Image (spheres, grey):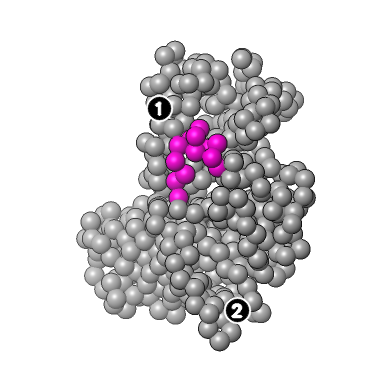
């Protein structure tokens, strides 16, 4: 099915199993040239394969190694293989392309590959991925990735997954990252900058500009303890890596990617002033990245859970009960219009703060209804059952009800499917 919020992106005719991206970036000109090889499976007979791809010059397209015809415009690359692909056929599409990437403009601002003052940031949620690679840009179509980036040796390059090779040439370095666990296109990322690696306890590290290294070391120092707490509460960490990047530029909000989060210089102050955001982004690895969305309308499964994780960190680390955070959020929400349904906020309100706060309150209502023991069993069951998959609001309701001895219909109806703000119970 097409995504109900973003039907203009993504194809339902096939699914991608692996992206092999081999990219070269020149910071001086901003130019990106690349070869993307998609391994895919046809879901139906395909006369053409439609990929999402922004404004680039396309130089060559091959299907199963053979030259194919294509047309490219309005963000779509329509590829016509020599003969139709049969339903169930496994095939590859190779695209060679180049240009200066342009962010995808929309109601959420500029998305995707973007220039920093001195480097590159990729922040695609929800539809910026075609700004840097051809893809099936549908949130529920997850694939593994190999991301190879060649850039001048004075820059560090980070991408999703494990660094499996790094070759220093004359003036450029080639970095190869493997993301083995399935990943949604919007979570694919490349970060390029003059970063140094700041070690944290327990083998974690932050990539930051030298001028911010000391503050970053302090502000992220509790992240290993946070990870340990979340593993206890949410289940095993879902990926091989967790990298953090702090950019030299300020960012409006931090950015989540799979196995990686990006913070702005303004989120590092040497006083842990943004530690709740550190918790929020880390929690997305379980909620949003491993357990992905079957459709964007279920966005609260990402944001409500990540917001509740902030409250949980506050509760366990700072001994401020989640009920206190919940009461604060409830008071703030009660002063705002009550015209948003958390389980289906509408595309324009995908990132409305009320989705975050009411989503977290919905989880708190489940917790106070079923009790702590059952609640954390539900969270762990959720991350296990849908690990590296996709899920819906009703899937969550089913998991929660399975472990809740009392009926939860009323809780879900009031907190997720009604616009009016219910009273807070504890
Ligand atoms: Zn978030």
Report the residue that reaches farthest toward the bottom.
170
Q: Is mark 1 within 8 Å of ligand 1?
A: no
Looking at the magenta stretch, what is its main secondary structure?
helix
Say what secondary structure mark 2 lies in: strand
User: Which of 220/403 is in front?
Assistant: 220
Specify few, some or many for label 1: CA neighbours under 10 Å numbering under 14, 14-19, or 20 or more.
some
Query: Is 229 colored magenta in this rendering?
Result: yes
Report the side of 45 relative to 56 (left or right). Answer: left
The answer to whether residue 36 of the structure is visible from this angle is yes
Span of residues in magenta: 227-239
User: Which of 84/96 is in front?
Assistant: 96
Rendered image quadrant of residue 327:
top right
Say what secondary structure mark 1 lies in: helix
Q: Is residue 156 above or below residue 351?
A: below
Q: Quadrant of the C terminus?
A: top right
Q: Which residue is mark 2?
A: 152
Residue 326, position as x, y percentages in the image: 66, 24
The answer to whether residue 113 of the structure is visible from this angle is no
The structure residue drawn at horizontal position 32% and vertical position 61%, both measured from the top left corner, is 40
Residue 260, position as x, y percentages in the image: 55, 54
Report the side of 107 relative to 293 (left or right). Answer: right
Q: Which residue is mark 1?
A: 399
Query: Is 409 colored magenta in this rendering?
Result: no
């Amino acid at each position: 099915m097409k995504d109900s919020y973003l039907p203009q992106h993504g194809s339902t005719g096939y699914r991608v199993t692996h992206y092999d991206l081999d990219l070269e970036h020149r910071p001086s000109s901003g130019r990106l040239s690349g070869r993307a090889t998609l391994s895919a499976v046809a879901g139906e007979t395909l006369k053409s394969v439609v990929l999402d791809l922004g404004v680039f010059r396309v130089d060559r397209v091959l299907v199963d190694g053979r030259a194919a015809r294509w047309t490219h415009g309005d963000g779509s690359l329509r590829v016509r293989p020599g003969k139709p692909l049969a339903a169930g056929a496994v095939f590859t599409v190779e695209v060679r392309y180049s240009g200066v990437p342009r962010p995808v403009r929309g109601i959420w601002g500029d998305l995707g590959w973007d220039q920093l003052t001195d480097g590159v940031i990729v922040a695609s949620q929800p539809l910026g991925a075609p700004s840097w690679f051809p893809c099936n840009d549908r949130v529920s179509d997850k694939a593994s990735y190999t991301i190879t980036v060649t850039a001048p040796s004075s820059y560090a390059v980070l991408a999703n997954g494990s660094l499996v090779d790094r070759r220093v040439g004359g003036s450029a370095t080639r970095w190869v990252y493997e993301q083995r666990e399935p990943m949604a296109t919007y979570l694919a990322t490349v970060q390029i900058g003059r970063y140094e690696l700041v070690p944290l306890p327990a083998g974690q590290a932050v990539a930051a500009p030298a001028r911010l290294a000391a503050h970053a070391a302090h502000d992220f120092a509790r992240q290993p303890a946070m990870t340990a707490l979340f593993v206890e509460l949410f289940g095993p960490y879902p990926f091989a890596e967790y990298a953090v990047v702090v950019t030299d530029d300020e960012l409006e909000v931090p950015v989540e990617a799979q196995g990686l989060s990006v913070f702005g210089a303004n989120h590092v102050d040497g006083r842990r002033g943004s530690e709740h955001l550190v918790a929020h982004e880390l929690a997305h690895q379980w909620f949003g990245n491993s357990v992905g969305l079957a459709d964007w309308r279920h966005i609260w499964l990402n944001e409500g859970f990540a917001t509740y994780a902030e409250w949980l960190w506050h509760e366990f680390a700072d001994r401020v009960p989640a009920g206190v955070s919940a009461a604060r959020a409830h008071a703030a929400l009660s002063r705002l219009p009550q015209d948003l349904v958390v389980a289906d906020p509408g595309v324009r309100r995908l990132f409305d703060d009320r989705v975050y706060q009411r989503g977290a309150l919905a989880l708190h209502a489940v917790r106070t209804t079923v009790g702590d023991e059952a609640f954390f069993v539900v969270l762990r069951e959720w991350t296990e059952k849908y690990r590296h998959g996709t899920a819906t609001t009703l899937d969550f309701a089913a998991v929660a009800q399975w472990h809740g001895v009392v009926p939860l219909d009323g809780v879900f109806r009031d907190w997720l499917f009604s616009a009016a703000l219910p009273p807070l119970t504890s």
